[in-house]
Amino acid sequence: MSALTEHRRPPEHGARTPAPRSRPFGAGGVMDVALLAALFAAALIPWWPIHEHGWFLACVGVALATGLAIGAVGALRRWPSWAVALTIASAYLLLGVPLAVPSRALFGVLPTAAGMVDLLTGTALSWKQLVTVQAPVGAYQSLLVPAFLLTLVGSAISATIALRTRHPIAAVVPPSVVFASGIALGVVHEQFAVAAGLAFLVAVVAWLVRIAITRRRALGASRRLEAALADLRRWVGAAAILLVALVAAAVVAVVVPTPQRTVVRSEIQPAFELRDLRTPLAGFRNAFAPDAADRPMLAVRGLPEDVGLRLATLDTYDGVVYSVGGDDGREISSRFARLPYRIDRTGAPGEQVVIDVRVLGYEDVWVPGAGLLAEIAFGGPRAASLADEFVVNDVTGVAAVQGGMAADDSFTAESVVVDPVDDGALDTLRPGTAVLPPGPELPEELRGWLLDHTPSTGEPGERLAAAITAVRQEGYVSHGQEGEASSRSGHSLDRLVELVMDRPMVGDGEQYAVLSALFAREIGFPARVAVGYLPTADDEPDADGWMVLTGERLQAWIEVRDAEGRWIQVDPNPEVREIPDRQPEDPTEVSRPQSVPPPPEDRTPVEDLGADSDLTPDDGEGADDPWVGILLAVLAWTGVAALAVLVLASPILVIMAAKAARRRLRRRAASGRQRVQGAWQEFADLATDYGIPVPSGTRAEQAAAIGGFDSVVLAGVVDRLLYGPETPGKAEARRVWDAVDGLSRRFATDAGAGRAFRAAISLGSLGGYAGSRRGGRA
């Protein structure tokens, strides 16, 4: 019968029977609860960017303390499972409204009927609402329910598993679910994700070390001093292993480029249909009708000088209409989300401003604003409904109210605004980068006009300044109203071609803004069209700082992105002045001058060789082969995955490497006596790793505790070689090591692959006192 088989049968002495876990509120129980609290604290880190509100900390803090208390008391009182479940449900109903739905709590602490309805419906529906609302959500409506529910239930289950079962290692499963849920429902934040992952890794490793130490103590150590020293050494070893893992993870985080991470909210399209809405540019001319031009539309206070009060930012042009996000809804600028709290604008270029807006005669879904919105608070009789229907696009800063705004509505908005650039500084701008939907090919007439008015060899900023100056100087303003010069509405490509071909150029902001945006894109600047109200020098604020904007202040301008990441407002509209009589068409005015190119220089043989299509390496069919890109992407992902696996497995690899180094030192000791003694130490450590208690005593006593005839024979051989008249040589030591190897293989065969692997990574034999205690004595 093998050593392991005999060990499974209770021996007469030295046997180990699994003892039930101790009372939960002893020293060990308090340590377990504290480590579980740390585990959940680390697991809740990805949830913070979702809420970013002080009430979130109170909500999950109380839920965590309540859940751990339920699990601990249930273990202490030995409650049945149904009693624990009933207590959790009662705590959820009692604490859910004041903590997870605070707006519905009476006096902030008592649940109400409406709050109970929101809590119960939020249990099933708040998960979907959470990913369709712009983060951070704060304590908005019932969106704290997911975090409260997961923390309460998960902590109670973890405490129950840790304090009442024989597999306390499974207590890491609930916090892992909380951690993964926070990542999936959260926001894309690469640096924050790395920090959260490292914190959770530290907490998990600490829990695993705690379980290993507890199990080692359960095996029994006859001497308290030796046990204390062993625990100290284990903690030091665990800390070293953890340090190696953290260093490896940090290297991977810094060196390896992380691919674009997506979460649930980045893949869900909120229910806000742009295709059914008309952009402000489409109805641009309506604002200048006789019955609308003098109509007060908005009153604003706090708007920076020369900054327009924007209604919408248009970034998609199909050759006919400039729109927000396109018709298919797949562009980022078409994705609107609810904003219950605020948007973090830390690090955004520009200055923080606060503007107050009152709605007078304005009626539309677009919410006026300036720059990038950070926070908004509605006022007036419809404040609550406006807040519920408010949506915003984080990329463009465009905001809307699904039901539309009306008279007596008001709001205060905090935004980050970039000051417009002076005309004299346009030529210093350098193009930045931005993801914009592709536009149509520029017609030859428009490209020719641009080349005629801008230096083709100049810097992009110089060309942009020249183009804007030319549009202002050659353009005249007419809205096509009664008594004005003829001017066709629309901003399609054929209307823009007509604009530059006519003499004089006659149009309004609808045409000039679109034309300038296309020119800016052709030059190399990311550009988009903005529509809103642009005050003039005649618009003076009253004594309270309010400025009233009428319908005729509606204007269109462009925004270009520079190398510093700023979207800069540029007004290309000409000043209103008398329009001269129309001139006869003269094609030569827009045609490019003919020039004779210089003859080509004589080419060298090296240049001729490089120009040969058969010999140029970049012109082969495989140069743009998509399979090459796919292969590189697969290799990159494989490398990242391999490094991630290596980081996660680094503690296991360190343990196995330490045992292999210890074995090598024992087997290659200087003398045969040391090698024989090292062989027995290796065998005793092997038994310890398999969960067999090895007492402090003679080798015969240790062999009896381990069990099996082979171990008793091995102990006798080792004693005879170490204490016999002749000094053992290397040949005798090699035979002893061969016997130990055979016993090791038998242990692995009898135990099975799973238990053999656990023994290979066990910390039981790495206590540091194996050499002194397990060496045995005659």
Image: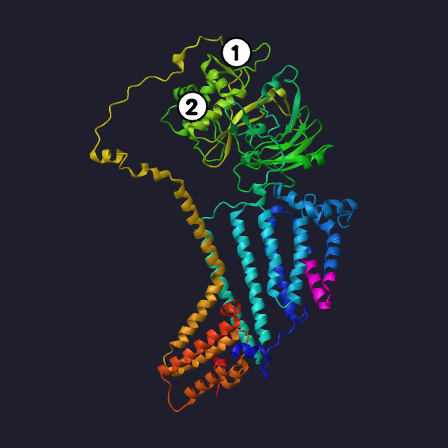
Disc 2 on helix, strand or loop?
helix
Instruction: Judge by depth and name the residue closer to the eye, 563 or 20.
Output: 20
Which residue was labeled with disc 1? 578
Dot 2 surroundings within 10 Å: few (below 14), some, or many (20 or more)?
some
Task: Name the image quarter holding residue 410.
Answer: top right
- Which residue lies at the image location 64% right of the left edge and 61% below the top edge? 158
Q: Which residues are magenta?
A: 64-83
Residue 185 falls left or right of residue 660: right
Disc 1 on helix, strand or loop?
loop
Looking at the picture, which amino acid does disc 2 mark? Ala
The image shows residue 229 at horizontal and vertical percentages of 53, 75
Task: Name the image quarter holding residue 620.
Answer: top left
- Which residue lies at the image location 60% right of the left edge and 84% below the top edge? 12
Q: Is residue 465 visible?
A: yes
Q: CA distance from mark 2 to mark 1?
A: 23 Å
The image shows residue 639 at horizontal and vertical percentages of 43, 52
Within the magenta stretch, is there residue 698?
A: no
Instruction: Judge by depth and name the residue closer to the eye, 740 or 241.
Output: 740
Task: Name the image quarter holding residue 742.
Answer: bottom left
Which residue was labeled with disc 2? 466
Do tag 2 and tag 1 residues touch (Cβ < 8 Å)? no
Within the magenta stretch, is there residue 76?
A: yes
Coloration mode: rainbow
The image shows residue 377 at horizontal and vertical percentages of 67, 37
Dominant secondary structure of the magenta stretch?
Answer: helix
Dot 1 surroundings within 10 Å: few (below 14), some, or many (20 or more)?
few
Lower position in the chain sequence, tag 2 or tag 1: 2
- Which residue lies at the image location 72% right of the left edge and 47% below the top edge? 101
Looking at the picture, which amino acid does disc 1 mark? Glu
Q: Is residue 769 visible?
A: no
Instruction: Judge by depth and name the residue closer to the eye, 347 or 507.
Output: 507
